[in-house]
Image: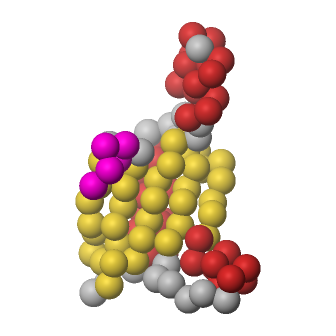
Amino acid sequence: MSDQVKLATSVKGSLDKVEQATKEALANHGFGVLTEIDVAKTFKAKLGIDRSALKILGACKPDFAHRALEIDPEIVLLLPCNVVLEDIGNQSTSVKIA
């Protein structure tokens, strides 16, 4: 596991189901999802490559982001926070937060 991964777990459930639960959990803690990248869909469309489901959610908590930017405007390079969801088979999804 990369040194940049702060939290990682696997959850029983399809990627779609885990994605919805993840978004709800983020919202319950004041985070919004600003961006969504469907890596598998993009690889298929641009490269003709099939791969397991993989999505990147760009999550942000506006008050935290604002305070961080006031302290150091260069922190913008780390925004938003990435939440990565990946189908790992057996009806399980990996969830990683960097």
Residue 76 position within the rendered picture, expressed as x and y whole percent measured from the top left:
64, 29
Q: Residue at x 44, y 75 (%)?
A: 15
Which image quadrant is residue 69 in?
top right
User: Does the magenta portion include 67?
Assistant: no
Image quadrant for the C terminus? top left
The structure residue drawn at horizontal position 42% and vertical position 71%, both measured from the top left corner, is: 86
Residue 16, percent from left and from top? 48, 75
40 vs 48: above or below: above
| Direction top: furthest residue | 71
- Residue drawn at x 27%, y 75% is 12
Nearer to us in this view, 50 or 71: 50
Q: Residue at x 63, y 63 (%)?
A: 37
Total numbered labels: 0
Please provide percent x and percent y for residue 71. Answer: 57, 10
* In this view, 63 is above or below 41: above
77 w.r.t. 98: above or below: above
The answer to whether residue 65 is left or right of residue 92 is right
Range of residues picked out in magenta: 1-5
Please state which of residues 62 and 35 is positioned toward the viewer in this rendering. 35
**Does the magenta stretch mainly form a helix, a strand or a loop?**
loop
Residue 22: x and y in percent read 43, 58
For the N terminus, the image quarter is bottom left
Where is residue 67, by image quadrant? top right
Task: Indicate the colouring scheme.
Answer: secondary structure
Is residue 66 in view?
no
**Vertical placement of residue 3 versus 24, above or below:** above
Residue 53 visible in the picture? yes
